[in-house]
Image (cartoon, rainbow, N blue to C red):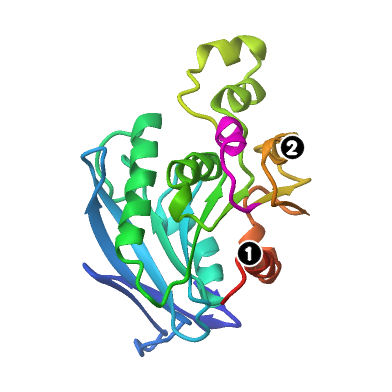
């Protein structure tokens, strides 16, 4: 991993993740990462990274729920971009991915998300005045449900490239169309969750998204309660923190002003 021709080598330890240059000298990338494990309500052991900024600190923590497939090593660029801007970020691998054990399922996904929120809440100390849930794609769909489940303790919700329901994304991704909707059990849906969530919502969707159609972002926004924002961007699916981190920071802080 590099930036401005600076080589950064990641070292994953039992409790810490550190960085060095090509000469094995320690580097401060602008954040620290604790490698943590906790037991989910799914009964599975879940691996997560607790990322804290070392420079600017916005006193705001984010539970970051990443997209489908992949693991922390493939999904960490977005959280790191937010940590560099001063947010504390907690990101997990769901059951069955990365170093988290168990089986991937919609039920385990929801339980893992709620357990991660509880873990972050338990570690939420006086330095954090705001708690945000940020989800991408599958994680964006999940984020709406986790936010609804924990609404009294959530300050705002951010959904990027999220689909409106499992049935909708199945119909979009399948040639079966309406038939696909009838075959996919909708255990929970972002569309329904947003209708019952009453904290600030930011929905981010790219007009160039080839994975989750832009129309689903519009559908989610239409069903969300005020106060809400719809941030229309460009570029590929779930790349907003890479290209628009400063703008996202500004929009989040406008939703949850610092005291």
Q: Earlier in the sequence, mark 1 or mark 2?
A: 2
Q: Residue at x 75, y 35 (%)?
A: 215
Residue 222's disc number: 2
Identify which residue, 67 or 151, lies in the foreground.
151
Tell whether label 2 touches label 1 (CB within 8 Å). no
Q: Which residues are magenta?
A: 190-201
Q: Residue at x 69, y 35 (%)?
A: 223
Q: Residues within 10 Å of mark 2 (few under 14, many from 20)?
A: some
Identify which residue, 258 or 111, lies in the foreground.
258
Side (left or right) of 201 relative to 123: right
Q: Which residue is label 1 attached to?
A: 252
Does the magenta portion include 73? no
Question: Is residue 255 visible to the viewer in this orientation of the structure?
Answer: yes
Identify which residue, 237 or 160, lies in the foreground.
160
Question: Is residue 97 visible to the viewer in this orientation of the structure?
Answer: no
Question: Where's residue 69, x and y in %?
Answer: 45, 42
Question: Where's residue 151, x and y in %?
Answer: 48, 48
Side (left or right) of 127 relative to 240: left
Where is residue 31, by image quadrant?
bottom left
Residue 199 lies, with reference to residue 256, above or below; the image says above
Question: Where's residue 175, x and y in %?
Answer: 66, 16
């Amino acid at each position: 991993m590099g930036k401005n021709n600076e080589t950064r080598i990641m070292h994953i330890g039992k409790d810490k993740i550190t960085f060095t240059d090509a000469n094995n000298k320690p580097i401060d990338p602008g954040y620290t990462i604790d490698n943590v494990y906790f037991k989910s309500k799914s009964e599975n052991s879940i691996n997560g990274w607790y990322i804290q900024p070392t420079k600017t600190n916005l006193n705001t923590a984010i539970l970051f729920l990443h997209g489908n497939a992949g693991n922390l090593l493939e999904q960490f660029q977005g959280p790191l971009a937010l940590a560099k801007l001063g947010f504390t970020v907690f990101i997990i691998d769901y059951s069955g991915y990365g170093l988290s054990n168990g089986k991937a399922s919609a039920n385990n996904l929801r339980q893992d998300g709620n357990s991660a929120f509880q873990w972050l809440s338990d570690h939420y100390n006086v330095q954090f005045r705001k708690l945000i849930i940020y989800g991408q794609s599958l994680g964006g769909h999940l984020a709406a449900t986790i936010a609804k489940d924990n609404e009294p303790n959530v300050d705002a919700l951010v959904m990027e490239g999220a689909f409106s329901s499992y049935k909708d994304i199945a119909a979009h991704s399948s040639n079966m169309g309406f038939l696909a909707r009838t075959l996919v059990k909708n255990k929970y849906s972002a569309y329904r969750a947003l209708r019952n969530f009453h904290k600030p919502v930011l929905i981010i969707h790219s007009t160039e998204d080839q994975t989750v159609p832009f129309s689903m972002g519009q559908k989610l926004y239409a069903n969300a309660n005020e106060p809400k924002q719809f941030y229309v961007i460009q570029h590929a699916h779930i790349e907003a923190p890479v290209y628009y981190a400063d703008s996202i920071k500004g929009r989040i802080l406008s939703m949850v002003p610092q005291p």
